[in-house]
Image (cartoon, helix red, strand yellow):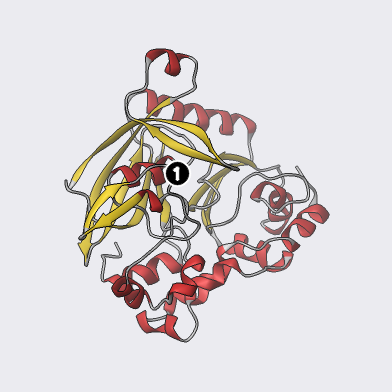
């Protein structure tokens, strides 16, 4: 792991951590019109502010186990000199007064917010990692996410089961679904069979709040699975273009129809207090809210921008 000096240098390069959204948590639905609360998550942060953010994001501390509530945009791992949670852990350990080195047990992807599980004991780390592996093998769902979607699933609850693989589109590598993967491609691990269970928690005005429980782990799995439901996640600027609409009816477009910014209708933009020019500031609304540990569930509240959106749309906050 990098030392405190390199952690500070990495933090100076941070351009996409969600600390700037903190002020948005108390903002009302109309606050975005004078200056969108979604813009703050991209602003440049200095090393002290980044570490202060992480120190204030602790949601659980007991024995060797520590849990943080990660903002969107912060990667867990990174190249030397880049900002990552791993690079900041030595400095965070000092700020929290911990004697032992911290290890990452489980964490959401860079673009997600939510629970990061850390351990200061090697044996505890291995024990928890094995616990999560065994839970998946037993058909259990130890991780629960919340997502705000543009579109409402046809069924109130169900499962998305498909193969996923990496595919090159020009200069971009994309995760694409493989509806009926062959046994050979699965055996060669060219394609991975993936499964996510979902449940609708609330709907309003063409948007929904979903509970997502992935049985498997694959990069961008949740975003791709939501597009297969024809309900892309709000703020998904990578995969949402795969869902088109004709006369209000959603359909899947070819994988080649890619854009860099999600397209929202005027009514939804107005409810969020956003202009079309501000759309690229909208962060992905997928949050790792709960992890089930051997001692019981561990929870982290959604970040301010997520709560702000729930209030703007009138979706349930619990």
At x 64% / y 50%, what residue is drawn?
85
Judging by the rendered image, the residue that carries numbered circle 1 is 256
Nearer to us in this view, 227 or 293: 227
Query: Residue 65: which quarter of the image?
Result: top right
Q: How many marks?
A: 1
Quadrant of the drawing holding the C terminus:
bottom left
Quadrant of the drawing holding the N terminus:
top right
Instruction: Note whether 178 is above or below 56 in the view shown.
Output: above
Secondary structure of the residue carrying tag 1 is: loop
Left or right placement of residue 1 versus residue 295 in this view: right
Q: Residue 289: where, in percent of width, then height?
A: 40, 52
Query: Residue 9: which quarter of the image?
Result: bottom right
Q: Residue 316: where, in percent of width, then height?
A: 26, 65
Residue 4 shows up from this direction: yes
Q: Residue 89: where, in percent of width, then height?
A: 69, 50
Nearer to us in this view, 129 or 218: 218
- Mark 1 surroundings within 10 Å by alpha-carbon count, few (fewer than 14), some (14 through 19), many (20 or more): few
Left or right placement of residue 199 versus residue 46 in this view: left
Q: Residue furthest bottom?
A: 34
Instruction: Note whether 258 is above or below 27 in the view shown.
Output: above
């Amino acid at each position: 792991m990098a030392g405190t000096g390199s952690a500070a240098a990495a933090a100076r390069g941070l351009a996409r951590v969600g600390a700037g959204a903190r002020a948005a948590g108390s903002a009302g639905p109309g606050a975005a019109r004078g200056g969108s609360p979604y813009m703050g998550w991209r602003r440049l942060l200095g090393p002290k502010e980044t570490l202060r953010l992480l120190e204030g994001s602790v949601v659980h501390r007991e024995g060797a186990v520590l849990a943080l509530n990660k903002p969107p945009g912060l990667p867990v791992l990174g190249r030397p000199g880049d900002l990552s949670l791993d690079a900041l852990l030595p400095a965070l350990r000092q700020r929290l007064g911990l004697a032992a080195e911290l290890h990452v047990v489980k964490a959401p992807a860079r673009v997600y917010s939510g629970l990061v599980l850390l351990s200061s004991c090697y044996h505890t780390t291995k024990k928890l990692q094995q616990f999560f592996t065994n839970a998946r093998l037993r058909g259990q769902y130890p991780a629960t996410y919340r997502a705000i979607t543009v579109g409402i699933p046809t069924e109130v609850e169900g499962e998305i089961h498909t193969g996923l693989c990496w595919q090159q589109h020009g200069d971009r590598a994309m995760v694409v679904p493989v509806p009926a993967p062959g046994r050979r491609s699965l055996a060669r691990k060219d394609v991975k069979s993936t499964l996510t269970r979902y449940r609708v928690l609330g709907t309003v005005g063409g948007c929904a709040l979903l509970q997502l429980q992935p049985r498997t782990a694959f990069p961008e799995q949740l975003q791709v699975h939501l597009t297969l439901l024809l309900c892309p996640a709000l703020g998904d600027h990578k995969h949402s273009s795969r869902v088109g609409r004709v006369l209000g009816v959603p359909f899947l477009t070819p994988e080649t129809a890619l854009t860099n910014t999600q397209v929202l209708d005027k009514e939804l933009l107005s409810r969020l207090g956003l202009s079309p020019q501000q759309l690229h500031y909208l962060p992905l609304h997928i949050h790792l809210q709960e992890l089930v540990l051997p001692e019981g569930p561990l929870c982290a509240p959604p970040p301010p921008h997520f709560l702000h959106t729930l209030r703007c749309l009138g979706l349930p906050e619990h």
